[in-house]
Image (tube, grey):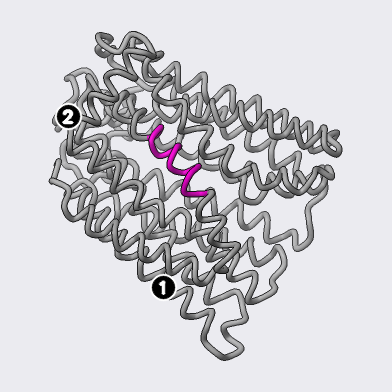
Amino acid sequence: MASTQSSQSRLYEWMTGDDDSRLCDDIPESACNAQPRNFIRHLWAALGNKLADELSSARLVLPWLMGIIGAPIWMVGLLVPIRESGSLLPQVFVAGFIRPLSQRKWVWVAGAAIQAVCALLLALLALSGEGTLGGSLVLLVLIVLSLARGLSSIATKDVMGKTIAKRKRGTLMGWSGSVAGAATLAAGGVLVLFDDRPSETVLAALLGVAALGWVLNALGAARLEETPGATEGGKSVWDSLKLGVKLFREDRTFLHFNLSRALLLSSALALPYIALLGQEQSGSDLSGLGIMIVVSGLAGMVASPIWGKRADRSSRNVMRDAALGTLLCCALAAVVAWLPGSWTTTIWPYAIIYSLLVIIHNGVRLGRKTYLLDMSDQDNRALYVALSNTMTGILMLIVGALIGALAHVLGSALLLLVLAATALGAFFSTQALPQVE
């Protein structure tokens, strides 16, 4: 046991660049002693979660599932909004629920376990689902999965704030992103092997592995050594809502941060349209999407540790620089689509720009997560995360519908210029945020 802990401490010190694994800023002494072990367990949990997310992707895997079982095409359009908004909108209510709990890791475990069960149900639907009924059941399971995802999401950030010290969280999320990139690369490699639509058996197997990923996530969370925290305040959903309204009214930095986060949605919204633009220009089959997934995995592996180190120094600057990068990627993709030459009708220029935007989007995610964690403290962190995510979920529904309508009218290339203008607004908004490190 002692040798294992020593190995974990050495690995932790190598990954964080720390000579002393017991240096902590804002967590109790007992949590500081367990920090190296918790750091590694967070990484294992992140690996399981990301692998599961990729193998049950609402952007790729679940549309195939709908096609195989013959579900109506309008149902396919509901997959991404349900997946994303379903995990964000209820979080303010979850904050009120978990507040009385001194240890929140069990909420994380419960969310991961529910997602594992949902993945198994989706695997069964891949084998036996059919038509409108099968598609309706997929959407119903996805709603439950998304709600469970939201449950885990808020608990994950709260537990991280209690188990990992202030100037190590960005580094942890950076390494988590790198591990996640490797998982994405593996998932993309599998998909590249299937130029045509995979069979029901292959889809069921992929979703079965996703279930195992969430089991690994639950086990990693369960083994975390979490010091019991404060349980005062926010004892009901109504209390959480009232406090949330008060925070938005009185905490100008929190309100400003959420405005910046809304503008930074441009990076997430641009990714599928760059992929779509590549498909429109190249006419590639499914292997082209597999290439997109592979390059995004490689980009995530390379970029996330770099962003994590920078986020620990200044998460505001990371968000600002990522906004500028989003602007450049969106504009570049639109310009390439309008250029003459046969090279613009292949998947590769769009795959390269896509991978660059994946790197940038990792910066957006790491920057805003680190900023939110560092601007809050142990007593209000869960509520801050929940309020911010709920607001983002509402905006995602509104902005997503607007962007979809604009894409129908303008086309992918012009829409990317609109998103570039949004990223410019994000650049100026994040630059005006105060430093919190």
The structure residue drawn at horizontal position 42% and vertical position 65%, both measured from the top left corner, is 418
> Which quadrant holds residue 393?
top left
Question: Does residue 52 appear anywhere in the picture?
Answer: no
Three-letter amino acid code at disc 2?
A: Glu
Residue 331 disc label: 1
- Percent position of residue 436, x then y: 14, 41
Query: Few, some or many C-alpha atoms within 10 Å of disc 2 (few <14, some 14-19, many ≥20)?
Result: few
The structure residue drawn at horizontal position 57% and vertical position 68%, both measured from the top left corner, is 411
Compared to residue 285, the image places residue 158 above or below, namely above
Compared to residue 121, the image places residue 402 above or below, namely below
Three-letter amino acid code at disc 1?
A: Ala
Q: For mark 2, what is the residue?
A: 250
**Which residue occupies the foreground of this view, 204 or 97?**
97
* Quarter of the rendering occupied by the C terminus: top left
Distance of label 1 from label 2 (alpha carbons): 37 Å
The structure residue drawn at horizontal position 41% and vertical position 69%, both measured from the top left corner, is 329
Q: Is residue 390 magenta?
A: yes
Question: Nearer the observer, disc 1 or disc 2?
Answer: 2
Give the side of residue 287 with respect to residue 262, left or right: right
Start and end of the magenta stretch?
Answer: 389-400
- Percent position of residue 14, x then y: 27, 45
Question: Does residue 115 appear anywhere in the picture?
Answer: yes
**Which residue occupies the foreground of this view, 91 or 55?**
91
Compared to residue 415, the image places residue 238 above or below, namely above
- Percent position of residue 23, x then y: 14, 32
Q: Earlier along the polypeptide chain: callout 1 or callout 2?
A: 2
Give the side of residue 23 with respect to residue 3, left or right: left
Compared to residue 350, the image places residue 29 above or below, namely above
* Quarter of the rendering occupied by the N terminus: top left
**Which secondary structure class fits the magenta region best?**
helix
Q: Is residue 347 magenta?
A: no
